[in-house]
């Protein structure tokens, strides 16, 4: 029986990199950067249209939210007969619905939770969404933030309530009945093969070392960035003010955030940062002068 | 005869309804006096239709019955081989109830009647009818609005029914009300706030087509519209590309563009549907039109549709 694996993350935290690794693993080191959804199934508007059996553009935001737990369960049922897990890219927080269910509920899959320290997320979301760093920090603390709000034209994507960065983490890691495995972006950078192999094991796939090696090589940041420059990347939204694959490093906050900005991030997210093993960064920011 | 208060025509059917359905064309008295083909009645919809053959979150289907529920709005039952729709409002406004009546519910009616339903729109032209199909977001409604603006009478929106007449395939006349996103309404030079929203709170509107054809029209061309994300450099806008599909791809495309094909499967009509699809693919050209996004291509797409249609008419 094959399970659904929610590939869940706050935006700009390594979700696409992880999908490229998975697509490269499935494709023996080769994948189409502009068709990541083919190798690794994504959850979008068309998929929801099919699961719900009704045009989501007829539904109001709260109606979509109320129907999503059932859509997740139906997806789990639809894919159960497959050989390999089905990966669903999700930026939404795993929020509760009005009747206490979860959008990605118990018994409908597990979560590969990709996370990146919020200092770097602030540095990365700002140019991506065309925000100032201050605005990015504000959004990271906003429990009511929704990505892709419904508008007066077809969007192809669904409204995704993000919660704050800390709220996002809690919604996934504390969701009852949804097993979760944390993949830290920083660990992926430091030891891509080992971190990726552990993620595969969590998904029920016994990692083949040769395939892991080829996949890691094909999804190296410099390669992804070179391919974006050469082939373009259709998942980069029209509004993005920077290349999708921008720096691909850990710690860029040190030259992109002021000490005051870094302190605000830590003040907003201290407990969650410590929970995820970012205590060293908390201590570093605490000791910043100025 | 029917003692229902409201009588309409759509897809060649005489519809007798307990509700006012302003989206549809009123039936002339001579038609209203006949036995209806489809009854829309207010009633109680059962909690279950038994063991479904196919199921989605909001509906369940088995041969002979299809049940649809939008929580807080209404429940719908389509049965009697697509001759009756039972509607039980559960909190929705009349506009809400109609929004879903003219969505999947109407699709189930047409499928149960064993009609061939494409997910797309159609207009009539001097060269005959063209159906424009495509997935959500391909640009069907925007293309339809532009073709209508150019003076081509509308035949149908969202669900296009094709049947074989004596002279070959023809598109049935649906109903004159289009569902347009706000951006398409604005492009047509209309003020969205003058139009009725499809549902309170959504920026999608009901728009009466400026010209509507009430008779069937011979089908000359099916266009499968496909939007792809352009990755060309800035300022270098790639052209709209047209490709006539070969036999195999044409059948596959028509299967994919069938309106909610899972309803066909759930109704136990897969074999009939497949035979029908193959027959249509052998009768008219099926052309795939690729349009780049986010470029503004509505004019170029309409040009390409007109060009392909003229070519198809010349044979």
Image: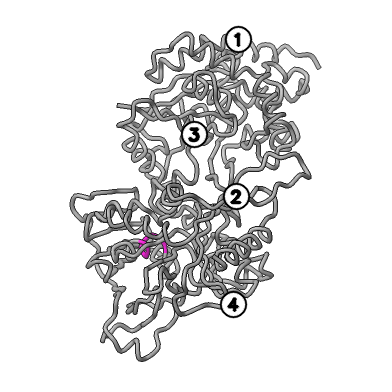
User: The disc numbered 4 marks a residue on which chain?
Assistant: B
Q: What residue do we see at 36% from left, 82% from top? A: B6
Q: Which residue is mark 1?
A: A190
What secondary structure is the magenta-colored segment mainly?
A: helix
* Viewer-side label of 3, 2: 2
Q: CA distance from mark 3 to mark 2?
A: 19 Å
Q: CA distance from mark 4 to mark 2?
A: 27 Å
Is there one chain holding both mark 3 and mark 4? no
Q: CA distance from mark 2 to mark 1?
A: 42 Å
Q: Which residue is mark 4?
A: B210
* Element on which disc 2 rests: strand
Q: Nearer the viewer, residue B187 or B125?
A: B125
Whole-percent x and y of residue B161? Answer: 41, 66
Q: Residue furthest right?
A: A290
Q: Which mark is residue A38?
A: 3
* Element on which disc 3 rests: helix
Whole-percent x and y of residue B96? Answer: 43, 65
Which contiguous range is marked in magenta? B103-107
Q: Which residue is mark 2?
A: B290
* Viewer-side label of 2, 1: 2
Is there one chain holding both mark 1 and mark 4? no
Whole-percent x and y of residue A124? Answer: 69, 27
Q: Which mark is residue A14?
A: none
Residue A214: image quadrant is top right
Is there one chain holding both mark 4 and mark 2? yes
Tell me if residue A63 can be seen: no
* Element on which disc 4 rests: loop
């Amino acid at each position: 029986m094959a399970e659904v694996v929610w590939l869940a993350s706050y935006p700009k935290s390594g979700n696409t990199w992880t999908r490229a690794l998975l697509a490269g693993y499935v494709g023996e080191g080769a994948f189409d950067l502009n068709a990541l959804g083919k190798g690794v199934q994504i959850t979008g508007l068309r998929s929801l249209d099919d699961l719900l059996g009704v045009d989501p553009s007829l539904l109001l935001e709260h109606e979509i939210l109320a129907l999503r737990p059932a859509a997740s369960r139906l997806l789990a049922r639809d894919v159960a007969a497959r050989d390999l897990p089905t990966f669903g890219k999700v930026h939404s927080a795993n929020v509760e619905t009005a009747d206490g269910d979860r959008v990605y509920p118990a018994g409908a899959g597990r979560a590969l939770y990709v996370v990146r320290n919020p200092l770097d997320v602030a540095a990365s979301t700002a140019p991506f969404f065309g925000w100032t760093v201050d605005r990015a920090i504000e959004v990271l603390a906003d429990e009511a933030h929704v990505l892709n709000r419904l508008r007066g034209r077809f969007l192809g994507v669904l409204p995704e309530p993000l919660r704050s960065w800390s709220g996002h983490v809690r919604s996934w890691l504390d969701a009852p009945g949804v097993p979760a495995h944390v993949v830290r972006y920083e660990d992926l950078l430091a030891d891509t093969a080992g971190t990726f192999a552990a993620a595969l094991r969590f998904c029920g796939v016994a990692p083949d070392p040769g395939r892991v090696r080829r996949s890691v090589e094909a999804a190296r940041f410099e390669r992804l960035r070179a391919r974006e420059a050469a082939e373009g990347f259709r998942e980069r939204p029209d509004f993005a003010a920077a290349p999708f694959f921008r720096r691909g490093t850990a710690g860029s906050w040190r030259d992109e955030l002021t000490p005051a900005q870094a302190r605000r991030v830590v003040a907003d997210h201290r407990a969650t940062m410590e929970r995820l093993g970012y205590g060293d960064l908390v201590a570093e920011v605490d000791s910043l002068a100025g | 005869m029917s003692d229902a208060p409201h009588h309409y025509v759509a897809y060649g059917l005489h519809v007798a309804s307990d509700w006012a359905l302003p989206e549809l064309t009123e039936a002339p008295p001579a038609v209203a006096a006949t036995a209806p083909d489809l009854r829309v009645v207010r009633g109680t919809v059962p909690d279950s239709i038994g063991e479904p053959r196919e199921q989605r979150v909001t509906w369940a289907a088995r041969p002979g019955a299809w049940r649809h529920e939008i929580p807080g709005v209404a429940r719908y039952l389509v049965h009697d081989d697509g001759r009756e729709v039972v509607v039980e409002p559960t909190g929705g406004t009349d506009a809400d109830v109609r929004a879903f009546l003219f969505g999947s519910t109407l699709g189930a009616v047409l499928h149960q009647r064993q009609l061939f339903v494409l997910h797309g729109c159609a207009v009539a032209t001097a060269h005959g009818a063209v159906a424009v199909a495509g997935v959500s977001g391909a640009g069907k409604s925007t293309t339809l609005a532009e073709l209508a603006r150019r003076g081509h009478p509308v035949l149908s929106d969202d669900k296009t029914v094709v049947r074989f007449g004596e002279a070959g395939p023809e598109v049935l006349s649906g109903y004159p009300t289009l569902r347009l996103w706000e951006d398409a309404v604005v492009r047509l030079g209309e003020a969205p706030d003058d139009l009725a929203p499809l549902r309170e709170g959504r920026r999608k509107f009901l728009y009466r087509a400026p010209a509507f054809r009430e008779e069937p029209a011979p089908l000359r061309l099916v266009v499968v519209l496909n939007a792809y994300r352009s990755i060309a450099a800035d300022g270098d806008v790639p052209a709209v590309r047209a490709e006539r599909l070969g036999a195999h791809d044409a059948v596959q495309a028509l299967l994919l563009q069938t309106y909610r094909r899972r309803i066909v499967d759930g109704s136990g009509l897969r074999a009939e549907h497949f035979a029908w699809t193959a027959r249509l693919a052998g009768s008219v050209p099926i052309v795939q039109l690729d349009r780049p996004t986010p470029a503004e291509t509505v004019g170029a797409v309409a040009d390409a549709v007109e060009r392909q249609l003229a070519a198809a008419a010349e044979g």
